[in-house]
Amino acid sequence: MAEVPEVETIVRDLRAAVVGRMIARAEVLLAAAVRFPSVDEFTALLTERVVLESNRRAKYILLPLSGDLLLAVHFALWGTLALVPTEQPRLPETLIIWHLDQDQDLRLIDKLGYARAAVGEPDTLAERLDLDSLGPEALDPDFSVDVLARQLARRRGVLKSVLLNQRVLAGLGNRDTDESLWLAGIDPRRAAASLTLDEITRLHAGIKKMLEEGIALRGTQRDLFGVKGQAVHRRHIFEKTREPCPRCGTPIAYIRIGGRNTFYCPNCQH
């Protein structure tokens, strides 16, 4: 599943292996994979553009290009990017190919077909993707306990749903939210505004720990070069219904919160 650790891993790989290189041309194999502009405009705009940088905002990969353009890629659930030799056979689930210099391709691959890309002027792209409305990044050095406390205090909804609201906290996904709440010992059904300072401090530490460990292990998916990450998708409790809690042995419970699968320990998460 492509959450922040998986996306950040690819962003760093792109920074090392693709920044500074030219996109000779783009080839769209699934028209629906281009959010905007039209497929013809998309391919025309990307012809002979140099990749200047590789950044991330929430789960968006943002690649500034020469000519004051910005390419955005979103993996959805299971998408990824692969840097491969041009002659390598294409997988059936390949959605878009960016043909680079040095006889290499950058390929957007998604077995479900939900991954998307868009290109445009930076301000236009940010407006259309609503990037400016996103909340603080959990991996930002400025993301402190105080910042998290302010973000939660503004919301009166259920904690799990609030944490998944990208306007509250950018990029935190379903898996890492459940795992962070378990590390903090906090019930996902709690009201967001009900947390004490001690609980917010534990939650902040849990979020940072989950994301930083996931990135250090290079995520759960294959990286840009096809190497499988060492992080485990089902870390402590996620998708472990009825298995014993690693902390207290109580069977892990499963519920739905805001339409999302949720896993927690009914004994040690209060």
Image (tube, helix red, strand yellow):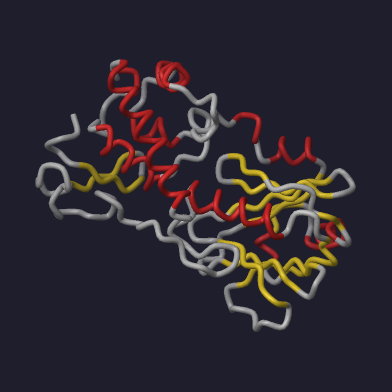
* The N terminus, quarter of image: bottom left
> Is 166 displayed left or right of 106 in the figure?
left
Q: Quadrant of residue 164?
A: top left
Residue drawn at (41%, 33%), measured in percent from left and top?
163
Total marks placed: 0
- Residue sticking out furthest to the left: 249
Residue drawn at (34%, 22%), measured in percent from left and top?
200
Indicate the position of residue 135 as horizontal and vertical percent values.
Answer: 54, 29
* The C terminus, quarter of image: top left
Indicate the position of residue 25 as horizontal and vertical percent values.
Answer: 83, 67
Indicate the position of residue 86 as horizontal and vertical percent values.
Answer: 73, 78
Residue drawn at (57%, 73%), measured in percent from left and top?
93
> Is 84 displayed left or right of 206 in the figure?
right
Residue drawn at (37%, 40%), measured in percent from left and top?
177
Q: Viewer-proximal residue, 191 or 195?
A: 195
> Is 268 displayed left or right of 137 in the figure?
left
> Is 89 displayed left or right of 243 in the figure?
right
Indicate the position of residue 37 as horizontal and vertical percent values.
Answer: 78, 53
Q: Viewer-proximal residue, 267 or 116?
A: 267
